[in-house]
Image (cartoon, grey):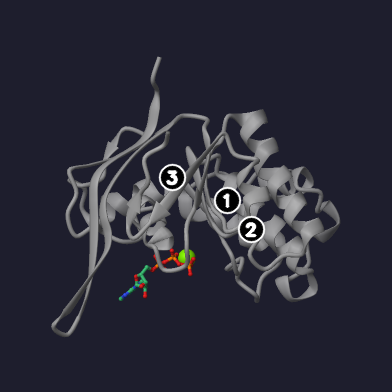
Amino acid sequence: MSDAILTARGICKDYRDGDRVAHVLRGIDLTVERGEFVAVMGPSGCGKTTLLNVLGLMARPTSADVLLVDGADCLSLSDRGRTTVRRERIGFVFQRFNLLRTISARGNIDLALQLRGAALDGQAARVLREVGLEECVHRKPGHLSMGEQQRVAIARAVACRPAIVLADEPTGNLDSANTQLVIDLFRRFHDAYGLTVIMITHDAGCASAADRILHMKDGMLEPVE
Ligand SMILES: Nc1ncnc2c1ncn2[C@@H]1O[C@H](COP(=O)(O)OP(=O)(O)OP(=O)(O)O)[C@@H](O)[C@H]1O
Ligand SMILES: [Mg+2]
């Protein structure tokens, strides 16, 4: 039985620069099932980050027919409603980690939990243990390796038990050993908690960890044979 956690139909996004309009997303249709791990591949500039930003409610589409995230009709929501859905149901992992540099690993996770209104009750330490960083709880990002920073970012993304995690080239700044660690973590959270993951990657090896690989070109998803 189908249990879609994300349904997108007819997603279009234009960027206007003076008189010029760039049609960056040109009618994206995408359904992701609850608990699916999906990889998105495609050439630089084809619109992958733009798509993730629209699906993650960080940007509004220029036009769209349907955008349902975990049952929420995101096209009819106000900015405040979109922020609530984003905070409560979506976790993000970025290529450059996007950790706050002035606070510790635990502080970064506590902040995400507080923004969601969730209890702290040791959850940050727990998820840091799950990503193998129990020793690093009090360290600030500047005192962590790149691979460790990304594992903190993953811990932060999953700490709130989101419905879906969106990852934009999460291994783009990592060597092969750390790339493998990061992919293994996504896979483990996916297998253990039924976490839904949508991950953009340029790395075919990373994509092969997913249940399904989507190919994007010129603002459209190519049909799957
Ligand atoms: N805020 C913006 N204003 C204008 N144009 C933009 C904006 N953001 C992205 N673009 C343009 O939209 C196109 C798609 O960008 P996007 O970042 O989505 O590509 P991408 O597939 O993620 O590329 P990469 O693999 O290099 O990260 C690019 O041509 C980019 O220059
Ligand atoms: Mg991108």
What numbered label is drawn on residue 157?
A: 1
Could you tell me residue 84's position as x and y percent?
35, 49
| Mark 2 residue element | helix
Single out the mark in the foreground, 3 or 2. 2
On whether ligand 2 comes within 8 Å of the CB at mark 3, the answer is: no
The residue carrying mark 2 is 153
The residue shown at (65%, 40%) is: 209
- Amino acid carrying label 3: it is Glu
Relative image position of residue 204 (x, y in whole percent): 63, 51
Q: Is residue 218 left or right of residue 101?
A: left
The amino acid marked with disc number 2 is Ala
SS assignment at label 3: helix
What's the distance in space between the residues labelled 3 and 2, CA to CA?
Answer: 17 Å
Quarter location, residue 23 = bottom left
**Is any atom of residue 213 visible in this view?**
yes
The amino acid pointed to by label 1 is: Ala
* Disc 2 and disc 1 in contact, CB within 8 angstroms: yes
CA separation in Å, label 3 and label 1: 11 Å
Spot occupied by residue 2 in the image (x, y as percentages of width and height): 38, 20
Marks 3 and 2, the one that precedes in the sequence = 3
Q: Residue at x 69, y 47 (%)?
A: 183
- Residue situated furthest top in the rendering: 1
The answer for how far apart the CA atoms under marks 2 and 1 are is: 6 Å
